[in-house]
Image (spheres, helix red, strand yellow):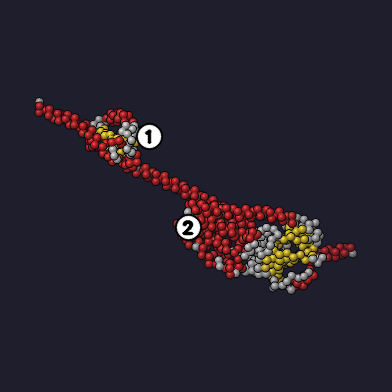
Amino acid sequence: MNHCLKSLLAAAVLLLCISTAHAVPVGQNGAVDLTGKLYQSEGESFPASADSLTGFLSGLHEIKSGNMLGGSYWFYAELNNGSANTEWVLEPDYRLIDRIEARIYGRNGTAQRIVTGYQAEHDYMLHYGKNIHLPAGGHAEVLIHFENLPFKFIPAVRLYTEHDYRHLVHFENILILSALGALLALAIYNLFINRITHDRALLYYSAYLMACFLGWAFMFQLPAELFGWRDLKWQYVPFFLLPVLNTLFYLNFLRLDQHFPRLRAISQINIALPLILLPSCFINSSYAHILMTAVNSLWIIVALVSGIASMNSGFRPARYFVLSFIALLLPAIVILGANWGLSDLIRNSKMLVLLGCTADGMLLAFALADKIRMLTEEKEQALQRMEKMLILTRTDHLTGIANRHAFDQHFECVFRHPDFAEDPAQLMLFLIDLDNLKYVNDHHGHAKGDELLSLFASALSALESDSVSAFRLGGDEFTLLAHKHEEDDLMEALAQLEKDIKANGFSETGISYGIAYACESSSAKDMFLIADRRMYDKKASKRQPQETQANAWDAAPDMA
């Protein structure tokens, strides 16, 4: 008998548990997800009391999911407060619900009314949570009406202690406002950089970040909090512009037109399609929501494929671009999946995606910096190549000293008529001719002649200093530009150089030179002509004794 009573008692307890299984127990701390039933709303009004709830719910049509194009719904749940806390916060965890109205029916006949959502005033900044009172150890029934809910899944409804919720709101607001501030700061900073550099990639990047900032500012009701502006249709406009502006950015940044013309053509869809569909924001916000989800899903896929292709082609800054879209894609999978009708399993998933967008913006900044670094390196290499080419154009290829082109530029630049003739710093020109180079070429070969030229040029180069410059003008002509106070030293050096050349196997070779001074010249050209005339005078004076001696030797046999 006792055994039968125990069995009956156990069965009764089991039936009681089954009958009350839908009642949610509320613990001491932490969030509690309310589980309940979803019903289609046909414009019904809230029941006046808990006594009317049973009949009210029996007249509704229970559904398992909503309509992605929007609709009105009832959500019903029961809860038991098994804690000593009496002050709680009820939060419907979604951001794009126009209006949320709820009744909390107590067993004592009370019915608390709360209104929240996009169009309502908020008790907590940037959050939908509303304060409610639950007696300790009491039982309550919650009935929530969602207006214009464009999702298939049932939005999470959570219950927090007031103390825990305040701490949670403070923490999340810091993250939200910091992320929004970072997006805005990056946008403004790069816009100023664009004004300096006129780099279109920076302009598109700044516009993209500004659209991110505006979209998420609307999402978290910042205009409503600051200015009381609650026009939901503007919510979607920045999100339609994100694919447009980012595609303009990466078309410029990734150089798709050079290496991947097909991807560039496909990417044009990310520009045209959002702009075509953008008017849906002002025609039907329910359609705008699903269309915005579609164009953003397409954009992320195409952009990521383009970034990977560019990275694999060897464009190193694309690494950061790919990382930025991975940072955006991971949280976006959650929110876009929810938009397509999958359950939103993460609390405040919008904040997670905002943080992903901020990480995306920062990594794109790294990508731009890496591209600037790469372009700077390429510019430096180009300048080095140009410098080498300029050096080659100013250098005599045989002797390695400066050539006629370098002389003409330098001579015109440094020529200046002195204030007085004895100025020791005035310009002085040595025009030098290497005697008998043709004789060496004719009798010993051009290789020997080139050796003589190189030997002589090397000796002249050794004379160079801050005030002395050496040049080969062509053929057997060389020149030294120097200050007048170097005259004696240079004449002595040239005399020694002539001896050294003869001692090195070129006994038939000599040096003839003419000197001109800036004080006696009206121009650089005039100075050159003076030096040239004096060089040939000296050459002629050296040639006359040689010719006299040669004639004497020719006449000697006849005299004998």
Instruction: Please give the count of numbered marks on the rendered protein.
Output: 2
**Residue type marked 1:** Asp
Q: Which mark is residue 256?
A: 2
What distance separates the C-alpha of mark 2 from that of mark 1? Answer: 52 Å
Q: Quadrant of the N terminus?
A: bottom right
Could you tell whether 2 is left or right of 448 in the image?
A: right
Residue type at tag 2: Leu
Q: Position of residue 140 (x, y in %)?
A: 78, 64
Element at label 1: loop
Residue at which label 1 appears: 466
- Give the mark nearest the N terminus, 2 or 1: 2
Between 491 and 348, the one lying in front of the other is: 491
Disc 2, SS? helix
Question: Extreme right residue here?
Answer: 1
Front residue of this view, candidates 86 and 305: 86
Q: Is 300 in front, or is 87?
A: 87
Coordinates of residue 530 in the picture (x, y in percent): 26, 37
| Residue at (72% x, 56% y) in the render | 165
Question: Is 120 on the left or on the right of 275, as rendered?
Answer: right
